[in-house]
Image (cartoon, grey):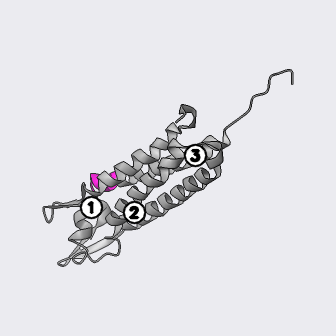
Amino acid sequence: MDAKNLNLLGIISIVGAIIVIVGVFMTWLATDLLDYTISGWELYTEWTDVLDTKYTFLPLADLIFGIIIIVMMIIPTFCNIDRFKKANNIIGLITVIAAVVMLIISGLFIIKDIDIWLITIHMGNHLKIGFWLTLVGTALIIVGGFMPIVKNRLTVTIKPKGE
């Protein structure tokens, strides 16, 4: 593998995907009222039936999304040669679109209100580090997803001054 074919900036997406995966297993919700913390994974596995909200699938979606992004970004990052440039650009674009969709779903999760035993909880007031890490990781994925496109577009040939 030639070092010039390595897209170092594409590693940003891989790091972002790892952050998203780690964030799923960290604390997503905590409330003093119930004195309880919930990780993203617990939110999906144990609280789906308890919470009256449509977006409890978000931790599972983040986990699957993170794994898929790692797999998808390996080729544009480590094999960015001329014959793969078009495919790498498409993979980068798909990555960006998927990350934007995940950000939109996360935004919908933030604005949700849930009712637990006659108590209304505003999600945005009780979100903790795990959820915010998934957002940061998704933002990094967007930046890294643009990198194959940017690297392939910025290949500039400089001509000598006399030609």
Question: Within 10 angstroms of label 2, few (less than 14), some, or many (20 or more) residues?
Answer: some
The residue nearer to you, when weighing 18 against 137, is: 18
In the shown orientation, is residue 134 left or right of residue 76? left
For label 3, the SS is helix
Name the spot of residue 70 as percent of width and height, x first. Answer: 42, 52
**Type of amino acid at the residue the image marks with label 2:** Ser
Q: Is residue 72 magenta?
A: no
- Give the quarter of the figure containing the C terminus: top right
**Residue holding disc 1:** 40
Residue 143 seen in the figure = no
The structure residue drawn at horizontal position 44% and vertical position 62%, both measured from the top left corner, is 102
For label 2, the SS is helix
Residue 109, above or below 157: below
- CA separation in Å, label 1 and label 3: 31 Å
If you read the primary sequence from the N terminus, does the residue marked by circle 1 or circle 3 appear first?
1
The structure residue drawn at horizontal position 50% and vertical position 46%, both measured from the top left corner, is 144
Q: Residue furthest right?
A: 163
Name the spot of residue 80 as percent of width and height, x first. Answer: 58, 43
**Type of amino acid at the residue the image marks with label 1:** Gly
**Residue holding disc 2:** 106
Name the spot of residue 44 as percent of width and height, x first. Answer: 27, 68
**Residue holding disc 3:** 148
Identify the image quadrant of residue 119.
bottom left
If you read the primary sequence from the N terminus, does the residue marked by circle 2 or circle 3 appear first?
2
